Image: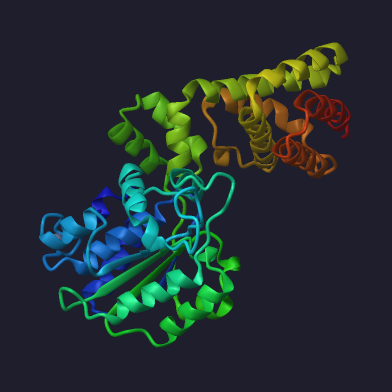
Amino acid sequence: MQFKEVIGQEEVKHKLVLSAKENRIPHAQLFLGPEGCGKFALALAYAQYILCPNRDEHDSCGVCPSCRQVAKLAHPDLHFVVPNTTNKSIKKDPETALFINEWRNYVLAKQAYVDPVSWYAAIELENKQGYINVRDAATLMRNLSIKSYAGDYKVAILWMAERMNLDAANKMLKLLEEPPEKTVFLLVAEDQELLLVTIRSRAVLVKIPGIETNEVEQALVARKGCDCALAHNAAILSEGNWLKACHYAEEEEDMKYYSQTFQQWMRYCFKASVGELVDFSNNIRGIGRKRQQNLLEYGLHVVRNSLLVNNGLLDKVLLPDDEKLFNVNFAPFVNPNNMIPFVELLEEGIRQIERNGYAPLIFLDISLKLTKLLRIK
Ligand SMILES: [Zn+2]
């Protein structure tokens, strides 16, 4: 992966390139950023850059044997540690090494825009979560003690480093405290609170923001062949998350569905029309759990936007124009006296559906409470 294949993030790329150019690559770095911002893609491009003997001022060459090996995730001096656990084929002592082929295929298929949920699905963890365990740390330690293949840098990428359990973290800490020579650790994480403070304090923070909306938009046109209007709307809704943007672009109909359904629902609530609310709640059963949750999430989005509108920040409202109009009209009904219960109601609904609650009852309950909340001045 070359830097030019990573969407946006020019500032971060510039800093990374500079550190290599000035020969001051920190031995441990924490790539911290929200889902879909491309933090793993950046770590991979940075690893390729560090390992490329023909790199120029901006990027790795992309064609030398080293770059080609990194592109296949099969460079002998590039090591991966990723969350894992037992599944149908690996019944005991799981560790990254046992999943390395799946990992390569997965990353290549996702063009390095990876996320834990789809990774766990790719290795069929079913409902289990993966974690980085002490065997992962021990194997890494062993691999890094061997002399580098090309006689230069060795790079270890720990993806979702916050998934390290305590034993693994303690072992990793030793590695970070006494790193083998010319070794670079790239810890990629979303939630630094879950990392041991001692590990955090040993790594230089590389903060990665969400991707700029216009970069997402351009990438949707260039990579996904989206038409401009769709790319524009999906980019706005993505909030800098490339995975979300792709999801919206692929499910354009869904996007319209959520906005229209939510608008309809709120009209019934305003009218306090119990009959229509009962019908609405019954019909919601047919759309499935995921869409029920998405609809409530969409509602949270509307409440947040209302707050922006009410505070004169209409330009910060990230919505396609037609939905923006609805939000502007809706905003006066959200105020400091009902906003928090409104949010809690929707969040509780999402949780109840997660726990397999009966959707028609959940939606009816929310509806009836909303008819009251929306009247609070
Ligand atoms: Zn190269």
| Front in this rendered view, residue 322 or 344 | 344
Tell me if 204 is positioned left or right of 375 in this view: left
Quadrant into which the C terminus falls: top right
Viewer-nearest residue: 142 or 75? 142
| Relative depth, front residue between 152 and 237 | 152
Quadrant of picture, ligand 1: bottom left
> Residue drawn at (58%, 50%), measured in percent from left and top?
128
Q: Is residue 213 above or below residue 34?
A: above
Point 57% across, 77% down: residue: 197
Question: Which residue lies at the image location 53% right of the left edge and 61% below the top edge?
Answer: 131
In the rendered image, the vertical position of residue 332 relative to residue 344, given as above or below:
above
Where residue 155 sits: x, y (%)?
Answer: 30, 71
> Which x, y percent locates residue 268?
79, 17
Q: As rendered, which of 291 and 354 lies closer to the eye?
A: 354
* Whole-percent x, y for residue 321 in the image: 53, 26
Asked if residue 278 shows in the view, the reply is: yes
Q: 180 above or below 5?
A: below
Measuring from the top left, give residue 186's x and y in whole percent.
Answer: 38, 69
User: Farthest residue toward the bottom?
Assistant: 178
Quarter-of-image position of residue 76:
bottom left
